[in-house]
Amino acid sequence: MKYKEIKIYPKKEELDGLVDALTAAGRSDLVINDPGELEGIMRAREEHVWDYVDPEVIEDLQGNPYVCFYLQEGEDDPAAMEIARAYDFTLTHVDDEDWLHKWEEYFMPTKITDRFVVKPAWREYGAKEGENVITIDPGLAFGTGTHATTFLTLRLMEKYLQPGETVLDVGSGSGILSVGAVMLGASRVWAVDLFDDAVQSTKKNAALNGCEEKIDAFQGDLTKGLDVKADLVCANLMADLVKMLSKDVAKHLKGRGFYLSSGILDEKEEEVSGAIRDAGFEIVETIHADGWCAICARYLRCLES
């Protein structure tokens, strides 16, 4: 479907009046960029209301204010357009297919560890000796595997997972870690995610890599209701969820008892490490990249056995 994007550029002191006028004219679908919100956003981050603010959001908010709305091709809104003409504005014709698929142009085969390359299903790649190539179709809701939180977990998995062991992947997303575990020799992987879209994505990417017989993907809330035990549990989530999971993860460990967690900002490392220790684990190693860290821990009772 094609749309017209109307983007209006008021002065800072005119922003509230513009929004009020468009709202009164019946536009309830406004996209508002208000640089005045940046201070509040950064204060909330400092207070740990959320872990991460995308740099593009910060960059956008550091610019000039604007208000944006969309009309379907052929649709008209005389009242809203009359308001727009009182300011500097642009009208651009866009296609939602462009929005949905433009990012695919930029997803190229990427070497994310010494042994792993992630490549999109629509591109060719000739694997070099010693490389494991994970082919994925992430869909629109999942990452490409090139973020630090993913490749840090894979680096730890390369080091601590032994062939023949089993893996529980909590928060599987697109299934990259599950597929990676099979490529490293895991005999079976249980992949659990809260969202059915993620479960389906994991199943699809497992099939793309010929791993579907070794990966059991299903919907669940962290480990609630699970009765499986694995040699290694991996969880690429976020700091607060890792802390929550750490209280229960030991019940799902056997053998050497390794627990790999990621999605943790550097400034939350000590907080998360403390929660992991309190749950009966020893911190074996922590690695860092791009402001994020991943933690390898081992359950003390497994160490004693």
Image (spheres, rainbow, N blue to C red):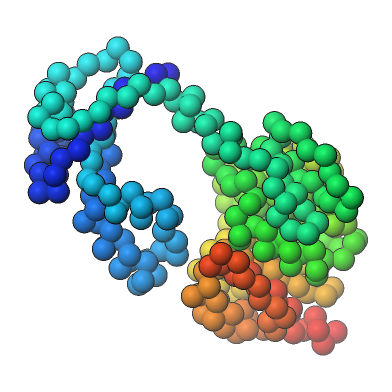
232 over 2 or under it: above or below? below
Residue 125 image-quadrant placement: top right
Q: Residue at x 72, y 51 (%)?
A: 111
As drawn, the residue found furthest toward the bottom would be 304
Residue 168 appears in the figure? no
Q: Which residue is drawn at 84% across and 51% down?
A: 131
Quarter holding the C terminus? bottom right
Residue 5 appears in the figure? yes
Residue 169 image-quadrant placement: bottom right
Q: Residue at x 53, y 73 (%)?
A: 266
Residue 113 image-quadrant placement: bottom right
Q: Is residue 261 left or right of residue 96?
A: right
Quarter holding the N terminus? top left
Q: Is residue 202 left or right of residue 139?
A: right
Q: Position of residue 73 (x, y in %)?
A: 33, 15
248 over 95 or under it: above or below? below
43 over 304 or under it: above or below? above
